[in-house]
Image (cartoon, rainbow, N blue to C red):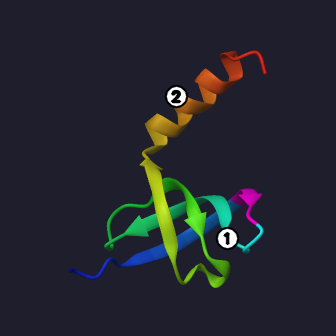
Amino acid sequence: MAEIKYEIIEEIGCLSESAKGWAKELNLISWNEREAKYDIRDWSPGHEKMGKGITLSKEEIIKLRDLLNEMEL
């Protein structure tokens, strides 16, 4: 399996944390030396391991923000 390279450009915030210390985070990440994108996924302490997640472009994260702002929570 090919190695996945990543660089966390900006740690934006933690959404939640599990009892085992894994944290669901929103970060700006460059995957395989490409343009950085917004990313929501679970990370182990120290960012050595990661879970499945979702990666969003700037346009997609703006649309997500707008949709969330329209919701009555």
Q: Is 15 inside the magenta-drawn segment?
A: yes
Would you name the residue on which mark 1 appears? 22
Residue at the image point whose x is 77% and y is 68% from the top: 19
Residue 46 in the image, given as x and y percentages of width and height: 64, 84
Discs 2/1, front: 1
Q: In this rendered view, identify the residue nearer to me: 24 or 32.
A: 24
Relative to the observer, which residue lies in front, 36 or 53?
Answer: 53
Q: Would you say residue 67 sits in the magenta stretch? A: no
In the picture, measured across the screen, residue 13 lies left or right of residue 43, that is: right
Q: Position of residue 71 (x, y in %)?
A: 69, 17
Residue at image location 55% in from the left, 70% down from the top:
9
- Which secondary structure is most common in the magenta stretch? strand
Q: Distance between the residues labelled 2 and 1?
A: 27 Å
| Residue topped by disc 2 | 63
Amino acid under label 1? Trp
Magenta region: which residues?
Answer: 13-18
